[in-house]
Each structure stands twice: as structure tokens, then as C-alpha cells.
Image (cartoon, rainbow, N blue to C red):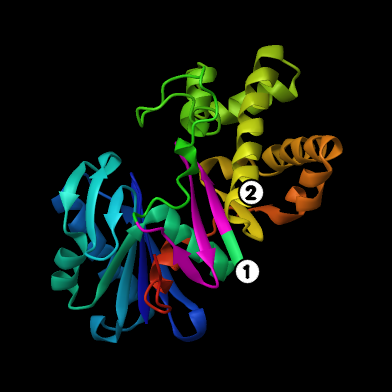
Amino acid sequence: MRIGLDIGGTKTDAVAIGAGGRELARVRRASGFGADQVVGCAEEAVREVVRRTGGRLTDVTGVGVGIPGVVDAATGRVRHAVNLGVAEVPLADLLSKRLGAAVIVENDVKAASLGAWHLLRLTGSAALLNVGTGLSAGIVVGGRVWRGPRGTAGEIGHAPIDPAGVACSCGQTGCLETLASGSAIARMWRTDAALPAVELFDRADAGEAAAMRVRGVFVDGVAQAVRMLVLSVDVETIVIGGGLSGLGERLQTPLREVFHHWAAASPFLASLDLPGRTRLLPAGTPAAAVGAAMLGTVPQFA
């Protein structure tokens, strides 16, 4: 069996994958904070999911890990995973020594893109557009992750689109992430609500003008991200994932309206069939964990 881990800011999902990609078991644990706790919790999650299969660690042929931050895929070293309190940690080496199995580490969005490609039975090329606190994409071609020579392929959230826009956390101005992300909603829609995006869409559905304006900016930003992926790498399918994909049809319906509006004004954009190439990742899909487990099954490329 292979094990996949999705290490998030608050939780770690582990999945055991058997022959033919069949899911054998799944567990969820707290991620911990700081390098030592993150590594320890990851080890415990692997041991627990293996126990649930009725197997042993010696049955594990490899472990894949998806984690936020800057990942050196060649060495498995992770840097700047700030939500986990990790400045730098040689995650692959440490976890491999504890488990006695080979460990591959990848950025969580890239791992999720591979998981979506397998779970949704996609073919050819695809991208997972992760709309969460930030905005980024993972690109898969023929079942292999495309990272680019420096690992930045798909980092479209930091493509500046508005020279007069607001400052981005990356140091640039007017990046796409400042319009189409959870952090963008939090900036544009000030609220004490536990789920700002849900409140925003609720208020917009009720006809509140300010909410409708902010929702329009956000949805248009997501649409621009889809268009950018199609125009830059021409992937056949774009899957929208991340926390805000949980809005479901409340996001997809106005997104399609933007696409149709563009198509009516541009025969070129109409020919790209953006509505037909875009879909939502089903809620609860363990894309990052499954993708992490699949990392060692097909050689990946830069």
C-alpha cells in the first residue's frame, strides 16, 4: 500500500491506497504547531491509518506528503510553512527515518491537483485552481505534475492585473489574489461572521448592494484566474477546489454568467468554451491526500 498525507494548518488527513488506487482507510488528526509537532503528528497519522487497514508498516511501499509552504521536491525540505509554525524542516528525511519507508514531499496544491486528476478520472491536461485563503493552481499533464524549473508553475495568484490595486503579501501590487481569495473577501467585506464568504453571498442573494458589489469583484477575479490558466497553459479541464469551492453552485452559477458575458463580446473567448472546461471539486474529496499517495506511482517532471 501507499500512504498519502495532507498536512494543513489545523488538521492532517491520511489515506491508505491499495492496488488499483483503491482507498483502504482514512484518518484525520490535528497537525500540531512547530516542526517537531508537525513531524510527530504526521508519523502518528501514518501509523494509525496503517493500523486501520489491518496491515503493518512493512506493507507500505511509499509515503507522499502534501504540505503548504515552499517545498524542494528533490530533497523533501519544507520552508516558510507559516501556518504550521515551520521555518524550515527536512521533512522527508525525518519522516522516512521514523517510518522506515521512502517519503516524497510536495506542495499541497500541487498534490491536490494530482489527486483531483485521479479521483475525477480526468485525461490529458488539467489544473486545480485552489481558491482558499490565497489563490494558486496545480497543473497536471498526462498524470504528472508540472512544476516548472523553479516550482512556480501555477502561482497565478501573484500575477499582477491591476497597477492601481492594493498591496499583495508577495510585495507586488494588484495581484489576482487580492481579488479572488478568502483573504480578499476578508479585506473587502469586514465582518465578525465565522464564515465571511457565506455571509457575503447570503447578503448578496438578499439584494444588499455592497455585498453584491464585493461578490461581483470576487467572482470576476475567479473567472480571470480560469481564463489566465486557459490562455497561458491551455489545460483541457479546470477544477475549482479550496475552501471557497464549498460555496458550490452559489459560486459556479455567477461564474458561468461571467463566462457567457465574455463570450458574447468576444468570439475568441467563446471558442475557448470556458463554462464547459470548468467544474467544482466535490465537497469532501480528499484530493491532496490521494494526490500525495500517487506521487511515487508515476515519475513527475519539472
- Image quadrant holding the C terminus, namely bottom left
Q: Is residue 11 above or below residue 27?
A: above
Expressed as whole percent of the image width and height from the top left, the position of residue 127 reads 56, 56
Q: Secondary structure at mark 2?
A: helix
Q: Residue at x 79, y 46 (%)?
A: 268
Disc 1 from disc 2: Cα separation: 20 Å
Q: Is residue 266 above or below residue 107?
A: above
Q: Nearer the viewer, mark 1 or mark 2?
A: 2
Was residue 263 drawn as part of the magenta stretch in this picture?
Answer: no
Type of amino acid under label 2: Leu
* Along the viewing direction, whichever of 200 and 26 lies nearer the viewer: 200
* Along the viewing direction, whichever of 65 and 45 lies nearer the viewer: 65
Left or right: residue 279 versus residue 59 is: right
Circle 1 crowding by C-alpha within 10 Å: few under 14, some 14–19, many from 20: some
Q: Residue at x 66, y 61 (%)?
A: 236
Expressed as whole percent of the image width and height from the top left, the position of residue 37 reads 17, 51
Task: Name the residue beneath numbered marker 1.
Answer: 122
- Image quadrant holding the N terminus, namely bottom left
Type of amino acid under label 1: Leu
Q: Secondary structure at mark 1?
A: loop
Task: Name the residue beneath numbered marker 2.
Answer: 231
Left or right: residue 117 versus residue 237 is: left
Residue 282 at least partly seen: no
> Over which residues does the magenta segment extend?
127-149
Left or right: residue 44 versus residue 7 is: left
* Along the viewing direction, whichever of 190 and 255 lies nearer the viewer: 255
